[in-house]
Amino acid sequence: MPTRKAGARARGFVDRCCIRWQLDDIADHAALIATELTANVVQHARTRFTLSVRLRQHHLQITAQDHFRAVPVRVIAEEFGGGRGLLIIEGVAAAWGCVATSDGKAVWATLRLPAGR
């Protein structure tokens, strides 16, 4: 359930994944993305959600899947006094997007793996 502690739990989960996969070079950006995706769920969706981290051949993919159908909207932070989450994700991720699911949506972001991985 989305709580104030969800962001810290998301960061810890992603940190453990990055340690296991020896991804020290992108661990901070991965944790930042996980925090922002989680914050969006807590603030906007307010539903149960699943955070997943997948190691792909050339990317690390972080996904937050919730049960709220409204898609995220990228806004300029000053327009609404907040809303920097997607701008932050866009600034560090190789790509991000949103996919509708049968009962909500999945918002994902990818980070390129370091060369030589």
Image (tube, helix red, strand yellow):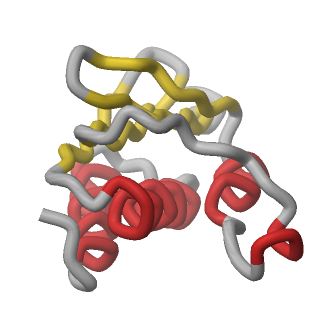
Residue 88: percent from the left, percent from the top? 70, 61
Of residue 85 and residue 14, the one placed in the foreground of this image is 85
Q: Is residue 96 visible?
A: yes
Q: Which residue is painted at 30% across and 43% down in the image? A: 21
Q: Which residue is painted at 22% across and 61% down in the image? A: 13
Residue 49: percent from the left, percent from the top? 20, 48
Of residue 17 and residue 117, the one placed in the foreground of this image is 17
Residue 55: percent from the left, percent from the top? 35, 29
Q: Is residue 8 above or below residue 84?
A: below
Of residue 99 and residue 112, the one placed in the foreground of this image is 99
Q: Which residue is painted at 30% across and 30% down in the image? A: 104
- Horizontally, residue 31 falls left or right of residue 68, namely right
Q: Which residue is painted at 59% across and 28% down in the image? A: 97
Q: Quadrant of residue 35?
A: bottom left
Q: Quadrant of residue 115?
A: top right
Q: Is residue 62 above or below residue 5?
A: above
> How many numbered circles does the render carry?
0
- Horizontally, residue 111 falls left or right of residue 66, namely right
Q: Is residue 4 above or below residue 1?
A: below
**Figure quadrant of the N terminus:** bottom left
Q: Is residue 31 visible?
A: no
